[in-house]
Amino acid sequence: MNPINQLILSVIRLLPRSVVRRFAMRYIAGEELDDAVRAVRAINSKKMTGTIDVLGENVSTREESLAAVRECEAVLHSIQKNDLDSNLSIKLTQFGLKMDEEFCYSNVKRLLETASGCNNFVRIDMEDSSTTSATLKLYERLRSDGLANVGLVIQANMRRGLEDVQRLIPMKANIRLCKGAYLEPESIAFRNREEIRLRYLKLLRTLLEGKCYVGIATHDDFLIGSAYQYIHEMNLAKSTYEFQMLHGVRTKLRDQIVDRGHRLRVYVPFGQYWYAYSIRRFKENPQIAWYVFQAIFSRS
């Protein structure tokens, strides 16, 4: 992180939580499930779909993991009850991945079965590099066990990304492709902005040519413009891909994408762990921290 971004983050950390909360809630639906339901309903009214994420990760007890499963099941039932156009995103460390992989698998399997009963879909988010191999292994096992209502995330900044994509194409995996949010060592991840952009486009083309359903997750104008070109060149049906953006980020751009006739999904996080999520998100994406910094001091 460059010195200016580090300074911005340091200033935000010094602010009272109540002040940070006021601006962080632009990017988070709220602390309760009802908040997420209201946010997704508003998103749906703009002809966009949603993905609800229950904030929290790296739990340390089985009880916490089981509680997370129950909370996610409540999300799925609420989506169905409220007739929302939304799916669910989960993090495996919230389900016990770092404690016991078999226990984590049973939790995810249970959730997917609940999702199937609700005619819904679950996206397994990708976390830091310490979990990448285990996440892919668990995903492949789920698919081999006949569970098809599950997708995965690939981070374009990871050097292993192309190998992982080629591994997933034969099963026609449903992939959310993002740049990558975690700060990783240069030995395993690209750090240069242009390198990451070029790798993103390489992975995107590979996935689209491999007939995978792709969530094109980016707020980068260059990548979105390049995606438009690929879609046109390949004459892709609008049912074979979608754009994805974060709640509260570049809302005018997402409206433009929808106006052009493309599917767009908005990622909607909620929960009690909003502060830790916000600080991590600010650290990983200095642009978001800058938006918040500007908002705080322009109002003050």
Image: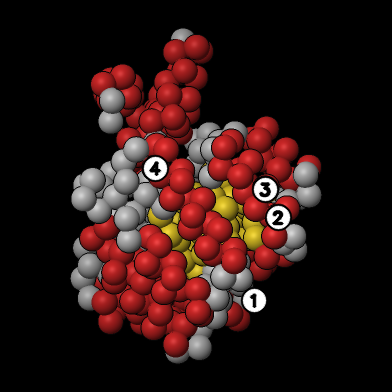
Choose the circle earlier in sequence order: 4 or 3: 4
Q: Residue at x 29, y 50 (%)?
A: 189
Within-10-Å neighbours for mark 4: few <14, some 14–19, many 20+: few
Choose the circle earlier in sequence order: 1 or 3: 1
Q: Residue furthest bottom?
A: 145
Q: Which residue is mark 2?
A: 233
Q: Which residue is mark 3?
A: 229
Q: Are marks 1 and 4 in contact (CB under 8 Å)?
A: no
Q: CA distance from mark 4 to mark 2?
A: 23 Å
Q: Are marks 4 and 3 in contact (CB under 8 Å)?
A: no
Q: CA distance from mark 1 to mark 4?
A: 39 Å
Q: Residue at x 58, y 80 (%)?
A: 116
User: Is 14 placed above or below 297 here?
Assistant: below
What is the x, y in percent for residue 255? 72, 39
Within-10-Å neighbours for mark 2: few <14, some 14–19, many 20+: few
User: From the viewer's perspective, is the residue at label 1 or at label 4 nearer?
Assistant: 4
Give SS at disc 4.
Answer: helix
Q: Are marks 2 and 3 in contact (CB under 8 Å)?
A: yes
- Viewer-nearest residue: 123 or 269: 123
What kind of residue is marked 2? Glu
- Numbered badge on residue 119: 1
Q: Which residue is mark 4?
A: 195
